[in-house]
Amino acid sequence: MLKDLFQAPDYYQIDELLMEEHLLVRDATRNWVKKEVSPIIEEYAQKAEFPQQLIKGLADIGAFGPYIPQEYGGAGLDQISYGIMMQEIERGDSGVRSTCSVQSSLVMYPIYAYGNEEQRKKYLSKLASGEYIGCFGLTEPNFGSNPGGMITNYKDDGDHVILNGAKMWISNAPFADIAVVWAKNEEGRIHGLVVERGMEGFTTPETHNKWSLRASATGELVFDNVRVPKANILPNKSGLGAPLGCLDSARYGIAWGALGAAMDCYDTALRYAKERIQFDRPIGGFQLQQKKLAEMLTEITKAQLLVWRLGKLKNEGKATSAQISMAKRNNVEIALKIAREARQVLGGMGITGDYPIMRHMMNLESVVTYEGTHDIHLLITGFDITGLNAFK
């Protein structure tokens, strides 16, 4: 096992743009990742298992709902702090960051933003502490990029509704205590419901044989005449815009998170290039290796500035869905390219579990697809700048 020697690149002195609170959050999260995630993550990725012992530590550092107000158990931090935490956690592993993103943006956020006071008090503090782990049910076997076509539905049954349908590719599903599920009512309107483990007819079979996000638990949500109390329906927003609002928050965190994976690959390649001797000198002294490293750092620097500005806009309530899509698409794309180039710098060693690069590369193949595919985000930008809808 190699010691975690990560040093973050900051070529444009972006630290000077951050507040003291941001730096404290970053350093605390980075130190926790070095101590708790880096020493074990290769083992858990190899055996395709989520390290559930990390949940308490993630809660302790405030990674669950960091921007949720303190009265509901959150840390009450700003959006840049949230982004920085996701950057540092994904620097450790995309799967661990996925658990945090789902808990924060796809479970806690809709309960906070769309739920009533009773629902907030019932669930949020337990989610923030890690006592409850949540998941988010939107994607279906036949409806991914077109979530509005979902067939999961519920029918009125007095004080309850009867929920039927299925969701797939759901992070945290195998061990989640609650699921925020999106389903159509009898009029075809989409609503969010909190479905609790133990409700009869609700099962969460695990998805196996993944080559990506191996240290993350993925599964299905199956609803077979599940009786859900009407008190569990989120009352304050309905329609497709409700789950898409959650995805905006998650995509924002991913834009920061993918940057963390890119930074880890770059740092690994840079250190290796300085130490690996071929033809009697370090390979970092050869032009083509320097080209790779210089281009990696250039893309990281641009991505750092992109998410910092997006974070400022989000703090001011001015970040648009299209701006978030641009950052998610760009940063995941550059992270994938950097991972592939870094793997080449390491040669054959780059495919081994002695280094994190191949694990990051495989993880990013999921990140580039989930929360909106690469192509869908391009079309979101295209629609925003032309006003012409290319989706249909």
Image: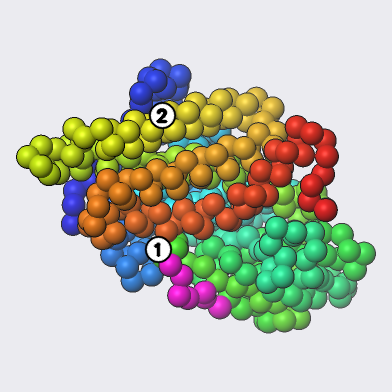
- Tell me, yes or no, whether the two marked residues, 2 and 1, touch with CB atoms within 8 Å: no
User: Which residue occupies 83% across, 53% down?
Assistant: 392
Position of residue 275 relative to residue 347, above or below, is: above
The residue at 82%/35% (across/down) is 387
Type of the residue with mark 1: Ala
Residue 214 falls left or right of residue 164? left
Rounded to the nearest angstrom, the CA distance separating label 2 from label 1 is 30 Å
Q: Is residue 76 left or right of residue 275?
A: right
Q: Mark 2: which secondary structure? A: helix
Provide residue 296's location: percent of width, then percent of height.
38, 36
Look at the picture and state if 14 lies above or below 362.
above
Residue located beneath label 2 in the image: 298
What is the x, y in percent for residue 188? Answer: 89, 64
* Crowd class of label 2 (few under 14; some 14 to 19; many from 20; radius 10 Å): few
Reading the image, the residue beneath label 1 is: 215
Q: Position of residue 39 (x, y in %)?
A: 25, 55
Vertically, is 146 above or below 164? above
Q: Secondary structure at mark 1?
A: loop
Segment colored magenta: 205-211
Q: Residue at x 47, y 41 (%)?
A: 334
Q: Nearer the viewer, mark 2 or mark 1?
A: 2
Is residue 18 or residue 123 the one in the foreground? 18
Whether residue 334 is visible to the viewer of this picture, yes or no, is yes
Which residue type does callout 2 highlight?
Thr
Q: Is residue 27 left or right of residue 21?
A: left
Q: How is the image coloured?
A: rainbow
Task: Specify the quadrant of the image occupied by residue 96.
Answer: bottom left
Could you tell which of marks 2 and 1 lies nearer the N-terminus? 1
